[in-house]
Image (cartoon, rainbow, N blue to C red):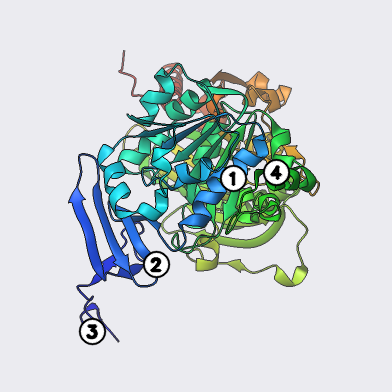
């Protein structure tokens, strides 16, 4: 077997990108034109036989002469053609000048403002990447502002028809250009009907960036989506661009309208054309699923009193068997039926000395029977299951335990129902609470994004809810005291539930209340209430 020592030593003339762990790309360096750490970034510009001049910031390739035209044409011509009447354009970043070059090709644009945090990048690129800017820095419509992008959009008195965020990845100086403060500022200085676009990484490898941007932008714009382009330099799949506006019609313009505008503009492009414009908004299913996730999480506790150590061990054995992996599989399978999900795979495990877990992968769509793994896998979760836990799934983990003193025992069950598409896990809410006969319940429900049907219609699943309690049956509401802590701006809903009252005889294991003195019953009742309230309020309550 080969070891690291057997691998060939990297050539000193190779430059390695450091964006991703465990894999990456390299360029042969024929000639280093410039390398220096500026006030904000580590900048290098070198020549490569295949890609021409290459610029990298902080170990990440930003642009190459060979394929930059794809990125810059798609970042500019898609929003400008969709808008149709853009007069004032703002570029955030873009120090290499190529975005400015493409915007300046639109004769109807009256002003172009570029905000760059690092003056050094602009001066370096004017000297070392002249083909990128192609003299566009001298356009009389152009104004350069050296400032932080977040600060500018939140302070400027100017307004714009199109804003292009040519940002680096969300690390280091570029991180602020992926924040709510930046998006809110862009909305502030965007004219009605304006369009905001931004690079959002390669969605196959950087899916979280797209999900995070979609969530944040949706607070400020009524139409948020993405479009794509294949750019060889940005390896790993299709490059994704965020799109945000309050005029959804701009994303659905007919090919005839785009064709007419393109013809009138006299643009001669190397990548962009009206057909590419329309096709770019077609997104892969894995990204659509990621943008339309709902997640329901339960933390459920059942409390019991067992007087002796032997009785406590007996309770743990009893409750562990009552909710073993087979029983949990039955509960989760019924949950799938209630919410309308199709089972793809089941993995289950009973643990020693106690506890169990079950994970079920599910699909919203009908499944070809030949593709279903009907086997319930014992033991650790198969790699095929673990690799797909970012998709729709239902899982539960249980753990019973006892306090070494005081006779208290707790049974805890953690349940997660995570779905994509139009499946709502709230349909199974009452069933799960009843099945686990809980004393304390903590529920978190997070709604993220939307899904589309085959006709392109958006479906915002559960976006109109204002409390998880609205989905609970009246009999459950009558049994529990409840409190909500909701973050409406983030579509996060949190409900805590505590049983209002209980009958002591149902909370004692192998001991009858009538065999105890009144004082013993009072002490045990107080112990149980104290334990429940400590779990409910998530803090230790001092003895009085």
Residue 45 in view of the camera: yes
Select label 3 or label 1 by which is in front.
1
Mark 4 nearby-residue class (10 Å; few <14, some 14–19, many ≥20): few
Residue 486 in view of the camera: no
N-terminal label among 3 and 2: 3
Name the disc covering residue 264, or none: 4
Name the disc covering residue 77, or none: 1
Side of 394 relative to 5 (left or right): right
Disc 1 is placed on an element classified as helix
Given residues 111 and 398, the one toward you in this image is 111
Residue at x 55% of width, y 63% of height: 385
**Res 110 quadrant in image:** top right
N-terminal label among 3 and 1: 3
* Residue 453 coordinates in the image, percent (x, y): 77, 46
Q: Quadrant of the N terminus?
A: bottom left
Dot 2 corresponds to which residue?
A: 51
Select label 4 or label 2 by which is in front.
4
Q: Quadrant of the C terminus?
A: top left
C-alpha distance separating marks 1 and 2: 23 Å
| Contact, mark 4 vs mark 2 (Cβ under 8 Å) | no
C-alpha distance separating marks 3 and 1: 49 Å
N-terminal label among 4 and 1: 1
Residue at x 34% of width, y 44% of height: 171
């Amino acid at each position: 077997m080969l070891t690291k020592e057997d691998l060939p030593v990297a050539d000193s003339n190779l430059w390695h990108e450091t964006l991703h762990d465990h894999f990456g790309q390299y360029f042969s360096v024929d000639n280093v034109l410039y390398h220096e750490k500026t006030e904000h970034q580590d900048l290098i510009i070198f020549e490569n036989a295949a890609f021409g001049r290459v610029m990298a910031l902080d170990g990440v390739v930003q642009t190459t002469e060979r394929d930059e035209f794809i990125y810059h044409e798609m970042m500019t011509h898609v929003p400008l053609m969709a808008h149709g009447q853009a007069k004032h354009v703002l570029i955030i970043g873009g120090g290499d000048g190529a975005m400015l070059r493409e915007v300046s090709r639109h004769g109807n644009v009256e002003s172009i403002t570029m905000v760059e945090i690092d003056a050094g990048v602009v001066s370096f690129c004017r000297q070392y990447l002249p083909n990128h800017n192609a003299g566009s820095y001298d356009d009389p419509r152009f104004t350069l502002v050296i400032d932080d992008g977040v600060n500018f959009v939140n302070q400027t008195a100017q307004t714009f028809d199109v804003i292009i965020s040519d940002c680096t990845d969300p690390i280091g100086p570029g991180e602020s250009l992926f924040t709510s403060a930046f998006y809110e500022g862009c909305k502030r200085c965007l004219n009605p009907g304006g369009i905001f676009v931004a690079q959002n990484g390669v969605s196959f490898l950087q899916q979280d960036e797209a999900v995070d941007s979609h969530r944040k932008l949706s607070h400020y714009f009524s139409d948020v989506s993405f479009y794509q382009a294949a750019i060889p330099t940005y390896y790993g799949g299709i490059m994704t661009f965020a799109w945000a506006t309050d005029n959804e019609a701009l994303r659905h313009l007919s090919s005839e309208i785009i064709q007419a505008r393109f013809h009138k503009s006299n643009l001669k492009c190397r990548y962009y054309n009206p057909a590419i414009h329309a096709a770019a908004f077609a997104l892969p299913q894995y990204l659509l699923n990621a943008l339309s996730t709902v997640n329901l999480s339960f933390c459920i506790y059942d409390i019991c009193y067992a007087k002796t150590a032997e009785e406590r061990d007996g309770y743990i054995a009893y409750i562990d068997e009552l909710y073993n992996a087979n029983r949990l599989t039955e509960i989760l399978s019924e949950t799938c039926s209630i919410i309308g999900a199709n089972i793809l795979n089941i993995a289950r495990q009973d643990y020693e000395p106690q506890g169990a877990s079950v994970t079920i992968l599910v699909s919203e769509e009908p499944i070809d029977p030949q593709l279903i793994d009907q086997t319930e896998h014992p033991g650790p979760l198969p790699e095929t299951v673990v690799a797909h836990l970012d998709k729709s799934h239902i899982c539960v983990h249980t753990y019973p335990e006892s306090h070494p003193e005081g006779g208290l025992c707790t049974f805890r069950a953690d349940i997660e129902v995570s779905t994509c598409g139009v499946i709502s896990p709230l349909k199974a809410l009452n069933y799960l609470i009843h099945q686990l006969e809980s004393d304390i319940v903590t529920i978190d429900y997070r709604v993220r994004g939307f899904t589309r049907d085959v006709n392109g219609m958006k479906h915002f699943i559960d976006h109109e809810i204002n409390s998880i309690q609205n989905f609970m049956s009246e009999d459950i509401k009558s049994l529990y005291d409840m409190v909500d802590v909701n973050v409406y701006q983030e579509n996060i809903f949190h409900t805590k539930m505590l049983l209002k009252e209980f009958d002591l005889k149902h909370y004692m294991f192998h001991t009858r209340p009538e065999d105890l003195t009144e004082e013993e019953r009072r002490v045990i009742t107080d112990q149980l209430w104290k334990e429940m309230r400590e779990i409910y309020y998530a803090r230790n309550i001092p003895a009085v």
